[in-house]
Image: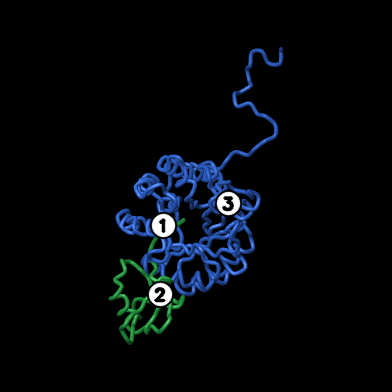
Amino acid sequence: MTKDDFQIYGQTFSSRLLLGTSRYPSPQVLEESILISKPAMVTASLRRQGANPNEISSGFWELLKKLNTPVLPNTAGCHRPEEVIQTAHMAREVFETDWIKLELIGDDYTLQPDTLQLVETARILIQDGFKVLPYCTEDLVVCQRLVDVGCQAIMPWAAPIGTGKGPSNPYALQILRERIQVPMIIDAGLGLPSHASQVMEWGFDAVLLNSAVALAQNPIKMAEAFSLAVQAGRNAFLAGAMPANHQAQASTPTLGVPFWHQS
Amino acid sequence: MNIFVNQESKKIDDSPLYVDTLLNILQPKSPFAISLNAQFIAKSNYASTLIHENDHIDIIAPITGG
């Protein structure tokens, strides 16, 4: 089988799973989950020092350094483009990376991105030299505009963040896959490995998830399950599925059946 | 001079007060980034950026995220 690396912004990754680092029961469980699933990147964020002593003093930075997995900082919690831009610049300095997961929230109940301001914000960040991975909805036109302003990959949601519902609009996601040519990472809303496998079978390039692993009863086992499911879905996409039929077709040859239609 | 560090009021006697002077006093844990009145201040500008009365300085640190 030919090598099937995942490439975005000219960088090659051997995994198609991106893993969030929040909400794990302990730093040890987070570390084991990363080690077993070998994600392409792990996400991280920024907050005021002292705002959450448990999070900040838990040795998270030391863990990131120790694991040496590429970090994808996010702009979580930002509701205005200027907040996103300031946060992105701070993230670049702290994490020493140009990668940024652009989150611009438009609605607090669903955490739906503010698609009306997302495109212009992405354009500014790209102009500032960032490798922007925008968290977006499955809206085809918004996704196309994000590509038009220079996003070399986009991250449509499957369902709202943290819901674990799986793809809530399969039709739109599949149309999106047909129409958008850049790599697409399904970000948010996945709850089960089968959800990840499903979107990979549709041809999406990778998945980003957090709560589905962190909130599982056994996060380490679930991280492994997702890793396998992502690979299974990818392999299925590359293999090409058989066409579905309404009429049954026997898989065992019928020629020479001794009692054909005698009963 | 009174300033706000991470939303808490703080009295600093040094004047003029530059960002790098303040950081020498506070000794925040690395790594961190600084914003002054909600504007990012790059490391390279710490020595030349003046802090004024009632300015808001945020010291931002890495945390877990999704």
> In the figure, is residue B9 to the left or right of A182?
left
Query: Is residue B57 depicted above or below A217 in this figure?
Result: below
Q: Provide the letter of the chain coloured blue.
A: A
Establish whether labels 2 and 1 are both on one chain: yes
Instruction: Kindly identify which residue carries mark 3.
Output: A158
Q: Position of residue A187 (x, y in %)?
A: 52, 54
Front residue of B4/A216: it is: B4
**Residue at point 50%, 51% (across, down):** A207
Q: Nearer the viewer, residue A260 or A36?
A: A36
Image quadrant in which you'd find residue B48: bottom left
Residue at left offset 35%, top offset 68%: B32
Q: Quadrant of residue B13?
A: bottom left
Question: Which structural element holds mark 3?
Answer: loop
Between circles 2 and 1, the one closer to the viewer is 2
The kind of residue on which mark 3 rests is Ala
Label 2: chain?
A: B
Q: Position of residue A95 (x, y in %)?
A: 37, 65
Nearer the observer, A100 or B25 = B25
- Mark 2 vs mark 3: tell me if same chain: no
- The spot of residue A93 in percent (x, y) is 37, 70
Residue underneath mark 2: B9
Answer whether labels 2 and 3 touch (C-beta < 8 Å). Answer: no
- Taking the image as shown, residue B16 lies to the left or right of residue A130, namely left
Image location (x, y in percent) of residue A174:
62, 51
Which chain did the image draw in green?
B
Query: How many neighbours does mark 2 have within 10 angstroms: few (below 14), some (14-19), or many (20 or more)?
Result: few
